[in-house]
Image: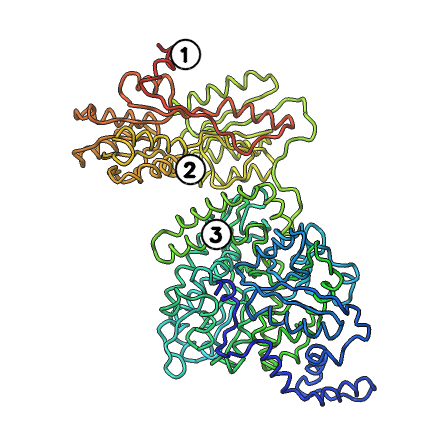
Amino acid sequence: MDKKAKMLEPVSNSSISVSQQWVERVRQVSVRACLMWAVAKAAGKAVFSIGGWAVLCTVFLGWGLAVADSSPEQRFAGIEITVGVHNAPTISGPAKAHALTWGQRTGGKVKVISTPFGQLFDAFKASMTAPEPVYDVLLYMSPWAGDFAPHLTEIPSELVHNETFDDILPIFRERLMTWNGKWIAITVDGDLFQGYYRKDLFEDPKNRAEFRERYGRDLAPPDTWADYRDIAEFFTGRQGPGGMALYGAAEAFVRGGQQFWDVFSRASAYTNHPDFKGAQFFDPDTMRAQINNPGWVRAVRDYVEILKFCPPDAKTYGIVEARQAFLSGRTALILDWGDTGSLANDPQQSRVVGKVGYFVLPGSREVWNARTWQWQRFERPHKAPFLAAGGWVASVPRNSRQQAAAWDYIQWYSNPENSLHDVVTSGTGINPYRLTHFTSIDAWTRMFTRSAAAEYLEVLRTSLDSPQAALDLRIPGFFRYSEALEIPVIEALKGAVSVEDALNQVAADWEKITDSLGRESQLAIYRTAMGLSSQPEGPRPPAVAQQRRFVIGFSQATTTEPWRLLFNKELREEAANYPEVDLVVKDAMDKIEQQIADMEALIAQRVDAILISPKTTEELTPVVSKAFNAGIPVFVLDRGVANDRYTQFIGGDNREISREIGRYVVKLLGGTGKARGKVVEIWGGMKTVASHKRHEGFYEIVSQEPGIEIINQPSDGDWKQDRGYEIMADTLAAHPQIDLVYAHNDPMAYGAYLAAKEVGRDKNISFLGVDGIPAEGVKWVSEGVLTATFLYKTPGSEAIRQALRFLRGEPVARRVTLPTLTIDRSNAGEILRANGLL
């Protein structure tokens, strides 16, 4: 069975279909009594209302007894429409049932085509673009709207102005039924995640006393994810009523079983900062993936940890199995859509009838602000209820030849009476989305006590009405993004990789997906989906070229390295070519705190543009973001920052340069498949993106050669010659054989050479570096000290040119990649002569 179809199955051992179950329930109602009630009501006589009978009669007469409500017009007689839906009983069950009653009412015919969920997206997309369409009505999950919107008709104005239209809650009506300001879908199901807990266990005096003693607070529904974790830990290993072994929580962990929505629901609390709307999945100003930021790391760590408080077989759970664990009484908590509320009160499917309470998704007192790249502390838990999937919607494709009948069917499917029956019927998969679903309390007493129904609906309504309620990802490629998340997270659950490494892989994959789909178009769609304006935040070139003086600030990390001295020299020389430029240079003298202070000073000065080469990545990211958020264009040079809240990055492609070094090493040590050798790698600054990329590309290549071994642990050389010497000296003492040294810059490679020469081992070792400064690295290659160096051109002169282009109103690329060159004995002399050094 398709994974998503299985995910959406109701928990039931019954072989009766959903439609058959409804028929059986209808038969249990006295049709004669309902008809008598209707006649009396029409005659203006007193109407009895015992136990919600009047409401149920209204529902059955309006839905189950469609013949009594048939329209004499039969205005769609002779017309057939085709409805497309997935092949699980949920959603498709109501589609078939309402097709029958719609036909009786209008004279039309409905053909329902059920397709496995995994094939549904492609089937719908193919039909919408075909000369001969298959479907007139599409029932689909709202995250697909970004892909479908260009092919959909607008809702007819008479439906938009129908009095039942405003009955749909605003969060569904305004956020999920529109696209680019146009009405393109009608909600037929309201989805969000919430929590469920065992009230009987929470109210047990022994449990309450022991929980307070252990955690120092009352046992109550969780306010934060830390609370949720503690409650799950507390109940794991305890005994429930009848001696049943208890576990803390039931969640989905298997790939394709709704796993990612459990993760998304946690990340919602940690990453949806109220001052930066729409930033849970991507930076809404740049479309950079946020999936590996510190908020997501914390969310996935929580998710990985909760597994040990779940039943032993929980690694195999999808949403169906998680529900079964909770409904069978094995766990104290579960996260789910609204379905568990009705299922838990169905005696045929639940052992915990009358024992279940409800809670809004937990929050956090610390929230990651991706705009400022910092955690922010809140006095009270910040909750961001998550509309996982957002629910199912119905649309009519442009190429449908029966659009009027199709919209009429959708209106019938989703009208207040029919939808009320659906939401109060277990197993339909339809959760409340209309105001009347919440106010028609009598209808809910079919499954709930009145007090339980009120509690259940209150939690749902509190979540939906929250100003911090967060929408699911709703852009083209939804399942490509979600599937890219699943495998690395499973590896983290196994303990095979760290959470950080798993999410870094996901982020890299998400960036590739975004680029393959078109970054600019994805950004525009993402902003629309998140309800944001079309114009991203951030500095923009002036609309009209300005002829005036420009103050450009430059924050340099250090001037203790020869490469940086050359960097400064080239930058100053280029700036001198433009009389309108006033250059303000600040040297952080190799100190993080000083560079932060330098940046703060440039922001306060309100310079026209800032150029920065960061000392480290994480520590400098917040102040770079601050400048960008203040409207100052920022040009990041050489070393990257942790996000992309900047105007442009200029530098070499460190990963590709290091791949080239890897290929050079393989050739030097014997060739592909034959290479043999013991290698020392000396890192630059281990807190810099540049150093990590200079490792990653190199390792990607040499790790494919079984005969090549990196023999030392990663050590931070801090880009300095003396540290290269020290690391190499220690390695020489520990390893009698060393065949090659790869250092992340030339000074460290030279320091390693000096250490080897000191003990007489330099002749048998090859030394490779990066930078390629003529007076330094190239000279050492020419002298036979280094085997090769790889050009890492300074970005100084290019930075001035690019900043001026921007300030003059010209567009600039997000990234400028500087060229590289392999320099060995074959071309070192030519480079030295060209620079007057030979």
The kind of residue tagged 3 is Gly
Closer to the camera in the image, 326 or 394: 394
The kind of residue tagged 1 is Ala
Q: Which image quadrant: the C terminus?
A: top left
Left of 79 or right of it: where is 148?
Answer: left
Question: Which of the 4 image quadrants contains residue 634?
Answer: top right
Evaluate whether residue 81 shows in this view: yes
Closer to the N terminus: mark 2 or mark 1?
Answer: 2
Residue pointed to by mark 1: 834
Closer to the N terminus: mark 3 or mark 2?
Answer: 3
Q: Nearer the viewer, mark 1 or mark 3?
A: 1
Q: Nearer the viewer, mark 2 or mark 1?
A: 1
Residue pointed to by mark 2: 689
Evaluate whether residue 167 shows in this view: no
Image x and y of residue 767, in percent: 27, 26
Closer to the camera in the image, 763 or 410: 410
Q: Residue visible at 36% across and 27% down?
A: 770
Element at badge 3? helix
Element at badge 1? helix
The kind of residue tagged 2 is Val
Please tell me the numbered disc located at residue 295: 3
